[in-house]
Amino acid sequence: MNERALRGVAARIDECIPRTESFTSGLRGPRTAARIGLWLGITFSIAFATGLYSHASQLATPPVALPTGPTRLYQVTQALHVAAGTASIPLLLVKLWSVFPRLFVRPPTRPRELVLHLLERGSIALLVGAAIFQLVTGLANSAQWYPWSFGFVGAHYALAWVAVGSLAVHVAVKLPVIRRAFADPVDDEHAPGDPAPGAPTRRTLLHATWASAAVAVVATTAAEVPGLRRVAVLAVRSGQGPQGIPVNRSALAAGVADLVADPAWRLRVIGPTTTVELSLDDLRAMAQHSAVLPISCVEGWSASGEWGGVPVRDVMALVGGGPSDDVVVRSLQTRGAYRESRLPANFARHGDSLLALTLGGEPLDPDHGFPCRLIAPARPGVLQTKWVHEVEVVAP
């Protein structure tokens, strides 16, 4: 094919691709994009900050000592994380719609301008790709649906940095445009490109977007708010479950149903000076403590109950453990990433950190960890290890 024919093919292809002027809606443009982008930046920042805290909370040895209170700290931060991520979905969709015509801007022909154009397009592609990945995988995680082979926690954490970094670069590049957009009124009937008289205005679009985000948040995360459970139609967990607390994994699913029913069960406690084995009756004979603590899962749901049992620090003292020691708690289940968890020293010595034996004054249901489970304040639910059979006191 000669050069003339190639030019003809290129011209026909160019004719098939829309141009920016093909999009005539007055609702699109910088004034809409900037205002939606502001709220999207806020929700992404909240999700990023709370996500960092959640990630640190799940590390065996956090980079800094995390606080043990208030009791509902993780419950609040993770609820904010899921709520901010949920609100970001309609915001991102409207943001992409408002700037969609920019996708069809023809690249410049001068080499220097072309390079800058391609760099800008590349950074935007990175931002949009990372944002979509975060929201889609986060939503799937809330529903406990994993149609991929990679590890969710590591990938979600890594792409969070990519999303926030590319967002910061994008804001820096577009700051002059953003300033001009906010300097102009949202709607100005005398300005070219504004919606026609009688048509929906930008203000209407913005209000509808914010309302959609609010509805999505309530429908997804309000199951634990008094009076709103019935409208939380998209919540992945309700208050239903054994003893009024929902579960993610049952004793049957974990493969421990027969083991927890064995009357020969013993809790093995390993310490720096000795090792002891305690029966369920031995644990019941020790001084008991009760506390109202939430199960707060990374998927965003939470539920509170009154747990009763033996303080972890009392069990540690039986084997010579001290206030500066950590504790590793191991489950009867043989598979799963969270079959054991590490309780840092400040949590281990907290009076409300329990090897729980009861819930609501009744023996634990097998699905809640019978005969013994860990429960501690301000901790992710995945680290509240169930079906405990071994506790080891370790140096920090």
Image: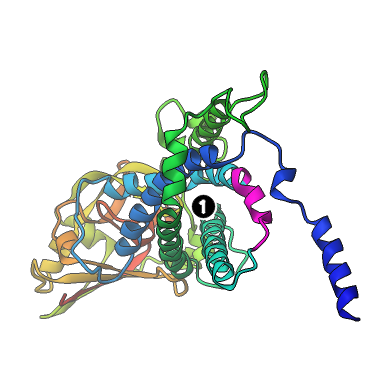
Q: Is residue 60 left or right of residue 182?
A: left
Residue 375, how many percent across, how many down? 29, 55
Q: Can you say which quadrant of the picture contains the C terminus?
A: bottom left
Closer to the camera in the image, 181 or 82:
181
Closer to the camera in the image, 38 or 209:
38
Q: What is the tally of numbered marks visible in this picture?
A: 1
Q: Residue at x 54, y 52 (%)?
A: 139
Residue 212, how many percent across, how many down? 55, 33
10 Å neighbourhood of mark 1: few (<14), some, or many (≥20)?
A: some
Closer to the camera in the image, 332 or 375:
375
Q: Residue at x 9, y 69 (%)?
A: 324
Is-magenta flag for residue 105? yes
Closer to the camera in the image, 262 or 160:
160
Evaluate whether residue 388 shows in this view: yes
The kind of residue on which mark 1 rests is Ser
Residue 52 image-quadrant placement:
bottom left
Q: Is residue 93 left or right of residue 181?
A: right
Up-down: is 210 above or below 332? above
Q: Residue furthest top?
A: 198
Q: Residue at x 82, y 68 (%)?
A: 10
Residue 393 image-quadrant placement:
bottom left
> Which residue is disc 1 drawn over?
142
Q: Can you say which quadrant of the picture contains the N terminus?
A: bottom right
Residue 205, how many percent across, how many down? 58, 30
Residue 140, how many percent across, how many down? 56, 55
Q: Residue at x 83, y 56 (%)?
A: 16
Is-magenta flag for residue 333? no
* Secondary structure type for disc 1: helix
Magenta-colored segment: predominant secondary structure: helix
Evaluate whether residue 267 shows in this view: no
Up-down: is 41 above or below 144? above
Q: Which residues are magenta?
A: 97-107
